[in-house]
Image: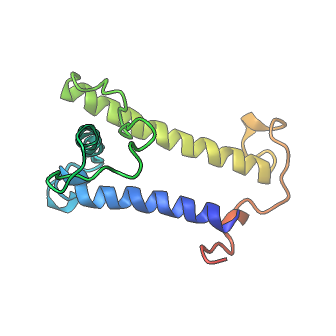
Amino acid sequence: MGSAAKWQIFAVISALELWDECGGGKLPHYTQGRKPGQYPPFDVLREVRKRRTAALKTPYNSSNTLPPPLPQTIGHPIFNLYDPFNLAKNMSEEKKANRLVAEINNGRLAMLGIFGFLSEGKIEGSVPVLKGVIPHYDGEVMQPFTDFSYFN
């Protein structure tokens, strides 16, 4: 993996963490009463885009509050990470809670599945259902994480 790719991953994760720490400009910090697991929506970015688009329609002078932005738009639609199409806005709290539990369980099952495949690849027969389906892997499965540095 090249250093440019490492820095891209680092920048995106850092931006998402910063957005979470700031509460997206709308929510309190998670140590000050925000619901655990509630990630701030990107609605603020939509509002900024609307204001800047409106500012572009008027001629720029010193009385305008917003100068025209360098990139006129962000370049892609702005979707929230959870429920990007706002399908859950009319859902009851009970149904949302049930879906949250289902989402957590799906994540746990995915992790078990990944480690099942890794185990079968390294130790043949360790997962009887996958015996003969996954070829043996002689390499080090955790090799991508050895000698990992953003500065190499």
In the displayed structure, 60 sits above or below 145; it is: above
In terms of depth relative to the viewer, which is nearer, 65 or 44?
65
In terms of depth relative to the viewer, which is nearer, 39 or 11?
11
Q: How is the image coloured?
A: rainbow
Q: Residue 56: which quarter of the image?
A: top left
Residue 106, given in percent of the width and then of the height, sits at 47, 36
In the displayed structure, 102 sits above or below 126; it is: above
Residue 123, given in percent of the width and then of the height, sits at 79, 52
In terms of depth relative to the viewer, which is nearer, 14 or 46?
46
Residue 86, given in percent of the width and then of the height, sits at 30, 27
Q: Is residue 144 left or right of residue 46?
A: right
Name the residue: 45% across, 38% down.
Answer: 76
Q: Is residue 110 left or right of residue 128?
A: left
Q: Residue 5: which quarter of the image?
A: bottom right
Q: How many marks?
A: 0
In the displayed structure, 95 sits above or below 103; it is: above
Q: Is residue 15 left or right of residue 37?
A: right
Name the residue: 25% across, 45% down.
Answer: 48
Name the residue: 32% across, 56% down.
Answer: 19
Q: Quadrant of the N terminus?
A: bottom right
Name the residue: 75% across, 37% down.
Answer: 130
In terms of depth relative to the viewer, which is nearer, 147 or 103?
147
Q: Quadrant of the C terminus?
A: bottom right
Residue 8, given in percent of the width and then of the height, sits at 56, 60
In the displayed structure, 83 sits above or below 36; it is: above
